[in-house]
Amino acid sequence: MGENIDVGIFNIKEALAMADDHGLDLVEISPNANPPVCKIVDYKKFLYEKKKKLKEIKAKTAKVVIKEIRLGPNIDDHDFNFKLKHAIRFLQDGAKVKVDVFFKGRMIIYKEKGEYVLLRFARELEEYGKVEQLPKLEGKRMIMIITPKK
């Protein structure tokens, strides 16, 4: 009952009658072709297999996880090392790390301090990941993205 039937070229009425004789459905596979390509199959089974293929494709795609770490332009060494350890763990787990320096109030005039902190962070993480996006100022934040090394 669930078999596919090869029918060749027919008009729509003959194909529908053939599908009805076998207790199956006429399914349009490629509507843009000339003439349109149809198959005589069990429609529910056809939908199930199509859904199964989509699920397999979705499972094979890699999911990119981005972890975010926020620093200040005047960060202390202990805090810096604490955040560094977290970043190392994230990179070892295979996640990207988005590091940003947030400037409060008038601290924005010290952009070079923020850039220095980010570049120092990148230098410390050199053996675990590489810089995907160099420090870039967006509003009151300076952002850098680091990807794990394979």
Image: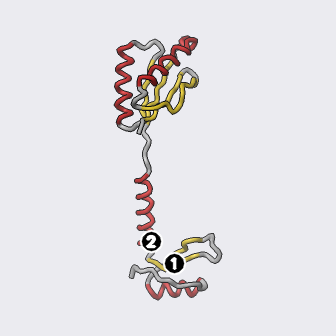
Instruction: Tell me the amino acid under the disc marked 1.
Output: Lys
Q: Which quarter of the image is occupied by the C terminus?
A: top left
Instruction: Tell me the amino acid under the disc marked 2.
Output: Phe
Nearest to N terminus: mark 1 or mark 2: 1
Look at the numbered disc 2 and give the secondary structure of its residue: helix
Q: Badge 1: few (under 14), some or many (20 or more) residues near its Cα, within 10 Å? A: many
Look at 48% across and 15% down and name the residue there: 73
Q: Position of residue 93 (x, y in %)?
A: 35, 37
What's the CA distance linking mark 1 and mark 2?
Answer: 10 Å
Look at 41% across and 23% down and name the residue there: 124
Residue that badge 2 annotates: 46
The answer to whether 6 is drawn above or below residue 59 in the figure is below
Contact check, label 1 and label 2, Cβ < 8 Å = yes
Q: Position of residue 132 (x, y in %)?
A: 51, 33
Q: Residue 111 falls in which quadrant of the image?
A: top right
Q: Which quarter of the image is occupied by the N terminus?
A: bottom left
Q: Position of residue 70 (x, y in %)?
A: 44, 23
The answer to whether 21 is drawn above or below residue 93 in the figure is below
Look at 36% across and 19% down and name the residue there: 81
Nearest the camera: 95 or 44?
95
Residue that badge 1 annotates: 39
Look at 35% across and 27% down and name the residue there: 86
> Is 33 placed left or right of 60 in the picture?
right
Q: Residue furthest right?
A: 34
Q: Residue 54 falls in which quadrant of the image?
A: bottom left
